[in-house]
Image (tube, rainbow, N blue to C red):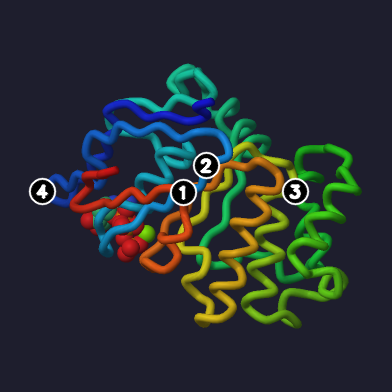
Amino acid sequence: MTILECKNLTKEYYSGENVVKAVDNANLTFEQGEFTAITGPSGSGKSTLLHLLSSLENPTSGEVIYNGESLKKYNDNQLSILRRRRFGFVFQAYNLVQELTGMENILLPVMLDKKKPDEGYIEKLVDVLGIADRLSHLPSAMSGGQQQRIAIARALANKPAILFADEPTGNLDGKSGREVLSLLKYVSAEFGITLILVTHDLGVAEQADRVLTMRDGVCKN
Ligand SMILES: Nc1ncnc2c1ncn2[C@@H]1O[C@H](COP(=O)(O)OP(=O)(O)OP(=O)(O)O)[C@@H](O)[C@H]1O
Ligand SMILES: [Mg+2]
């Protein structure tokens, strides 16, 4: 089943008199549960494409279709609910709240949504990610890899349909990066989550079900 599509998706940025087509007429489909890697050189439009697909940014033209519905029909409030409930985000910077413990960080999105956490699910997530002994610690007492695993648990706490990840291993050394990636891949498969991941690293991209390559805003299968 197709969970996400984009049609003629384009984003232009203006700098003075120049127009940069950061994303140039992308037509893509993403199947539920599939792991897609988006790769390409710096400045080729990977992050912009991810932001458009996840409604963090509005396209200049074209549309994104989630679960058969065009996001053009959604107002800002509906988009933020969609992002909070159906999408998870992992970035290169872990963005944990420094004053909160590991567990408090993980539960933050569930609390913000005024929902009761599914304790069995959170426990399983924590177990799979190997962070059980970090839950009462503050981020400052964690390694980069541990912080990113907490950030992944936080992104998955609401059981999203799609996890968007932008260079999630970019700040980690080779070994922790590989560990985090294989965990991301494993938890997504385990919980049937669609994974759309941006990476410079061809070794990372190799592990995906399919790889999209961007060059000057053009995305190729
Ligand atoms: N907010 C913005 N305003 C103007 N130009 C932008 C903006 N965001 C991105 N761009 C331009 O759009 C193009 C694509 O940028 P983008 O950040 O999507 O690339 P990227 O592939 O993610 O690069 P990197 O691998 O370095 O993260 C670049 O030319 C960039 O300078
Ligand atoms: Mg980028």
Residue type at the position of mark 4: Asn
Residue type at the position of mark 3: Ala
Q: Quadrant of the C terminus?
A: top left
Q: Residue at x 66, y 58 (%)?
A: 152
Q: Quadrant of the N terminus?
A: top right
Give neighbour class at mark 2: few <14, some 14-19, many 20+ (Cα, 10 Å): many
Q: Residue at x 51, y 54 (%)?
A: 165
Give neighbour class at mark 1: few <14, some 14-19, many 20+ (Cα, 10 Å): few
Extreme-left residue of the structure: 17
The residue that mark 2 highlights is 34
Is label 3 within 8 A of ligand 2 (CB to nearest ligand atom)? Answer: no
Of tags 1 and 3, which is closer to the observer? 1
Mark number displayed over residue 157: 3
Q: Position of residue 126 (x, y in %)?
A: 80, 61
User: Cα distance, mark 1 to mark 3?
Assistant: 24 Å
Of tags 4 and 1, which is closer to the observer? 1
